[in-house]
Image (cartoon, rainbow, N blue to C red):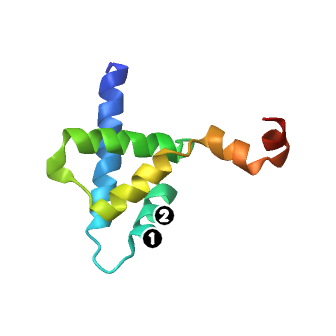
């Protein structure tokens, strides 16, 4: 059985590989590449968490890197975990804070 660190590393590698593959599509805007990646994430996986795993993997494995433009979008996604989005979407919660 793998430990949690190994599982996270493996997930980061898979998530990164899927982004690298999408990034090779020459005639697609980076926004559509990111959307395709997010839509293809496993059910229940927070896109922000997935983005953070990719960022960590990108720092470790610079041989399989994504374009700077796509990386900027991934970094933005990483800033918006589900909890933060939920607070933004619920105006009553915003009024309470």
Q: Which mark is residue 35?
A: 2
Position above or below: 8 against 57: above
Position above or below: 96 against 32: above
Callout 2 secondary element = helix
Q: Quadrant of residue 84?
A: top right
Marks 1 and 2 in Cβ contact (< 8 Å): yes
Give me the residue at 74% from left, 50% from top: 89
64 sits left or right of 31 in the view: left
Dot 2: few (<14), some (14–19), or many (≥20) neighbours within 10 Å? few
Q: Say how many tags the image has.
A: 2
Give me the residue at 47% from left, 39% from top: 49
From the image, tell me which residue sits under label 1.
Answer: 32
Specify the farthest residue to the left. Answer: 63
Specify the farthest residue to the bottom. Answer: 27
Q: Quadrant of residue 29?
A: bottom left
Position above or below: 10 against 79: above
Which part of the image, by quadrant, shows the N terminus? Answer: top left
């Amino acid at each position: 059985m793998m430990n949690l660190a190994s599982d996270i590393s493996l997930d980061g590698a898979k998530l990164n590989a899927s982004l690298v593959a999408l990034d090779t599509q020459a005639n697609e805007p980076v926004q559509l590449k990111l959307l395709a990646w997010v839509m293809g994430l496993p059910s229940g996986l927070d896109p922000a968490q997935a983005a953070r795993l990719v960022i960590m993997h990108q720092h470790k494995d610079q041989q399989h890197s994504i374009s700077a433009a796509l990386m900027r979008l991934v970094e933005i996604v990483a800033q918006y975990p589900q909890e933060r989005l939920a607070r933004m979407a619920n105006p009553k919660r915003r009024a309470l804070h």
